[in-house]
Image (cartoon, rainbow, N blue to C red):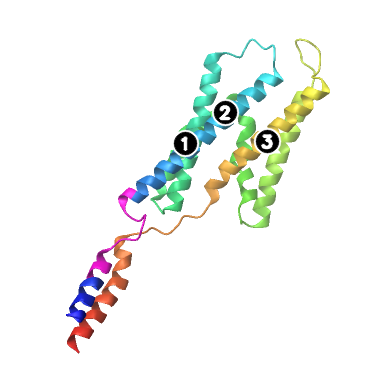
Amino acid sequence: MARLSTRQGAERHAGARPAGAGPAGARHVMLRGALAGLGLGLLWGVAARVWMRLMNPTSPEFSWAGTGMILTMAALLGLGVGLLAAAKVKGARRWWRLAVVPGLLIFASQGLLFLPAFALGGLVLTRRHWALRALGAAASVAMVVVLGVLLGGVDEETMTTLPTSALVSGVVGFVLLSAAMAAAGSVLYRPWAPRTRSASIAPMGSAEVAAGEGALAT
């Protein structure tokens, strides 16, 4: 009887799934990734909007519609990055890379300044070859220099330049926003976890069942 119980327990173990490996666990991973990405994307969008407003306090170009567009695009990119990060953690299919594509609209127009930080800056935070990390750092630093030159130039309409305090705050704000964008971009270069399937558990379960059958035979 004891040997029969051993065999039954081995069979139950063979059909069992590890915690979090089932469909429900996978959905929870994806949901957490989506919510985290959405929240961080919105936070970045708010910070970027405040930064732009500080750089142009009297500009009539700013509107609630524009603010809503920035927040929407930032949230969309954050959502895509969060989904991709979760997909890599749980070893999902590679087509989850496409989740990032809709959010790339944020790099249109003035957002283009942050594209190098997202596309290449993330390499700095990975374990890739030092040359690739150097490329990512160079691309990010180059955009800081470009922004400094743009902000330090003379406004063609007013023929004035930004005060030093505004120039410094603009560059510092850009560096912080770019660092956050690089952290998001690093998800693109993270490795994919191996896919977890119930079939991969079969050899272990089969071995235990065979051991139980051997015990019954003796």
The residue drawn where x is 69% and y is 15% is 57
The number of callouts visible is: 3
What residue type is disc 1 on? Leu
Q: Which residue is mark 3?
A: 176
Where, by quadrant of the figure, is residue 197 drawn?
bottom left
Residue 34 screen position, x and y as percent:
44, 39
Residue sitting nearer the eye, 39 or 192: 39
How far is the residue under mark 3 from the one under mark 2? Answer: 13 Å
The label shown at residue 79 is: 1
What residue type is disc 3 on? Leu
Q: Secondary structure at mark 1?
A: helix
Q: Secondary structure at mark 2?
A: helix
Within 10 Å of the Cα at label 2, are there few (<14), some (14-19), or many (20+) other Cα atoms? Answer: many
Residue range of the region highlighted in magenta in the rendering = 11-24
Q: Earlier in the sequence, mark 3 or mark 2?
A: 2
Residue 187 in view in this figure:
yes
